[in-house]
Image (tube, rainbow, N blue to C red):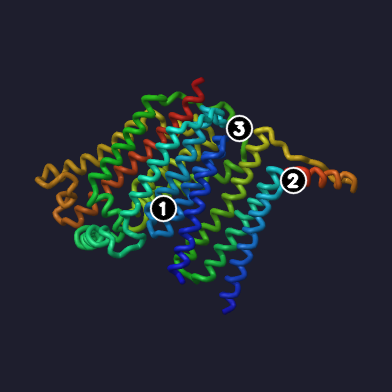
Amino acid sequence: MIENLHLIIDVCLLAFLVLIAFTAMKVTNLFVATMLFGIFSFVAALLFLDLDAVDVAFTEAAVGAGFSTVLMLAALRLTGAVENAKHRHSALGLFIVILTGAALIYGTADFPNMGDANAPVHLHVAPEFIQLTQEKIDIPNVVTAVLASFRGYDTFGETVVIFSAGVAVLLLLGMGHVEPKQEPEQNTVLWIVVKPFIALILIFGLYVQFHGDFGAGGGFQAGVIFASGIILYSLVFGEGYARKVIPSEILPRLAALGVLIYGVTGLASLLSDKPFLDYNALSSNPVAGQHMGIILVEAGVGLAVFSTVLLIFYSFSGVNHNE
Amino acid sequence: MIIDLLSDICLLLGGFFTLTGAIGLLRLPSFYTRLHAASVTESLAAPLLIIGIMLDTGFTLDSAKLVLIILIMVVANPTITHALCRAAAHGGNTPEMEITSSDKNQSQTEAELSGKESK
């Protein structure tokens, strides 16, 4: 019964995803399309949650449904909300799309069935990770152990990718300069409600950051949540005031510092004749070293993600004010 | 036993209000009335559903977390509705304030409403 229930929920959510995707394609109002993308991400997060991938669901909800939507809205302020009415139907394009789609569907035929216990990933990689996490790292959340320790190289790459995305946006748009308005628009209800909420969001961000070893979450999610607290402040009280709290000049430095913390943690193990990012070298007790390494690396990721996310938001909203 | 029954009642009521909210969102004529229907879902149906779940799970850490979620929802959702209303009014979407003092007026409004619905 329970198995069937999960299957029904999955199928419903997948059907929703398809419907939302088609609607987003059809809609010409970009504002509506942005909202549909947000809903799409949120339904995807629900799907991940139903598949017991809590960390992925968390990231999808924070980044896909939360931050991306805000970013798209900020971009819409610059572009306008209506799509150009130029719909050319090219036969070649249709052919390529059908070919690619067919190739992709053909590719899925090689996949193991969903939940197949004999799938290669459940026979070789997963048991090893689960066993080694208990033996060598000793934290409850296997995802964090895989992300920060076993696959530390990949995560380092991801952090650098996020950092370079921030740098690219900074080079293209610049940060702009926004002075706080002399008299912010009076909006008592929002002000009163939002103030404690910002505090809650920031505390929750820190909780996710430092609780990543034990529960769902980690540096990526915490960075986005912490940044969304500042973005909320900026949306309600005005861009200029947010820039007084966290000046735009320090954001690129903070992002670089985050990547630097990650890299230096790797170098520290290299200096004591261990492989790059081998946290066993950080302390005389290997398990304590792993704990320390994971906390350091997550802090670096959190700092880099937080400042990059905020930097991109500042860049997008700064352009409008310059003109 | 009674708690199970209460939990069922809460869940059913929550489902009912979600349904009415969804129907209202689709059927009601103007932005503000639709927002009203949507806010019923957020501020009444969702807490009812969560209370139903809480009664089912019993007195655990999970139900404490659910209490927090209810608190956040009850404060945040009306605020979001308020902000949406403000934004709509700011953007020039003024609500239709027709005071139905006589029957004639009322029938006019109804005619208008049904006219819009059929669109």
Q: Residues within 10 Å of mark 1 (few under 14, many from 20)?
A: many
Q: Name the quadrant containing residue A134.
A: bottom left
Instruction: Report helix, strand or loop for mark 1.
Output: helix
In this figure, which residue is indicated by the disc labeled 1? A57
> Does residue A138 appear in the picture of this structure?
no
In this rendering, position of residue A33 left or right of residue A247: right
The image quadrant where one finds the N terminus of chain B is: bottom right
* Chain letter of the residue beneath label 3 in the structure image: A
The residue shown at (37%, 55%) is A216
The residue shown at (24%, 62%) is A123
In this figure, which residue is indicated by the disc labeled 3? A185
Q: Nearer the viewer, mark 2 or mark 3?
A: 2
* Chain letter of the residue beneath label 1 in the structure image: A
In this rendering, position of residue A241 left or right of residue A297: right
In this rendering, position of residue B77 left or right of residue A38: right
Whichever of callouts 1 and 3 sits on the residue coming sooner in the sequence is 1
Question: Marks 1 and 2: in contact by CB < 8 Å?
Answer: no
The kind of residue tagged 1 is Ala
Classify A139 as above or below B111.
below
CA distance separating discs 2 and 3: 39 Å
